[in-house]
Amino acid sequence: MKVRSSYVAAATLGLAVFGTLLTSPANAATIFTAQLTGSQEVPPVSTLAFGNATFTLNDAMTALTFQVTVSGIDFTGTQTATPNDNLVSAHIHAPAPPGSVAPVVFGFFGAPFNDTSPNDTVITPFASGVGGMISSKWDANEGNNTTLTAQLPNIIAGLSYINFHTVRFPGGEIRGQIVPGPIAGAGLPALMALGGFVWARRRKAAAAAAV
C-alpha cells in the first residue's frame, strides 16, 4: 500500500507541476530519459538486450521528440540467424509506475503506429552488430485512442514507460520508465527533480525580466 500511495501522491504532484509548466514563463525545452532493461518488464525478462532513450518536450508542450538506441534486438530480421530476437513493435505506455503495466498510448514501430500527422519516425539499424536507433516525434493530437496533450500529466509524473517487443517476448523484452532529466528511477524523486527544474526556469525568467 505504501508504494501505491506514493504513486498516487506522485500523480497528484505531477498534475500540479504540469499546471506550473503551463503557466510558467517559457525559456527552454524539458528533457526526459529512460534506461531500457529486461528487469523492468512485468514479469522481469532475462535478456542481454538493453537501450537508452532521450525525450525532448518542446517549450510549447505540443511535441515530444525522442531518440532510442537499442542493442541486442534485431531491427531488420537479418542481423542474427534466429527470428526470436526480431523487433515486432515499440510503444510508449501509460499510466503506470514501475512494476505495473498500462495500455499503449503512442506506437512508433509496428502496430499500433501513431506517428502519422506527419510521420516523423526514422529507423536506423546498426551497420554492424545487432540493434539500431529509432527517432520519432509525438505531436499534440497524435496517440493511440488518446493524445499527447492528454498524456502530458502522466509523462511529467513519471507514470509512462517505453517498451520494445520481440518475437520471443511479445509482452516486451526491454522496458524503461520515462523520467524527467538524466536520472535513474521514477515517481516522487523524479518529480522533485522536475519541480527544481521549474523553479530554476522561473528564476531565470524573472532575472531576465529584471535586466
Image: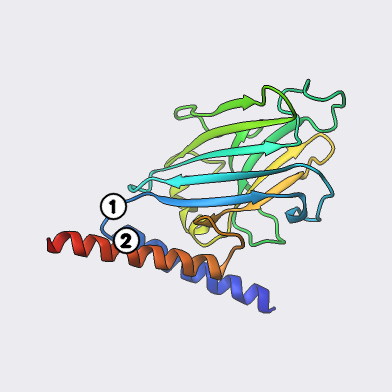
Q: Are marks 1 and 2 in contact (CB under 8 Å)?
A: yes
Q: Name the residue under label 2.
A: 201
Of 201 and 104, the residue lying toward us: 201
Neighbour tally class for label 1: few under 14, some 14-19, many 20 plus, Cα within 10 Å: few
Residue 146 visible within the image:
no
Q: Which residue is the extreme one toward the front?
A: 128
Is 143 rendered above or below residue 191? above
Coloring basis for residues:
rainbow
Q: In which quarter of the image is the N terminus?
A: bottom right
Is 203 rendered above or below residue 126? below
Q: Residue 206 carries which label?
A: none
Q: Name the residue under label 1.
A: 27
Answer with mark 1 or mark 2, whichever residue precedes in sequence: 1
Q: Quadrant of the C terminus?
A: bottom left
Image coordinates of residue 188 in percent, x first then y, are 55, 70
Which three-letter amino acid code belongs to the residue tagged 2?
Answer: Arg
Residue under the image location 62 percent in, 76 percent down? 5
Residue 195 visible within the image:
yes
Residue under the image location 33 percent in, 58 percent down? 22
Q: Which residue is the extreme one toward the left?
A: 211
Quadrant in which residue 81 is drawn: top right
Is 83 rendered above or below residue 66? above
Residue under the image location 60 percent in, 26 percent down? 123
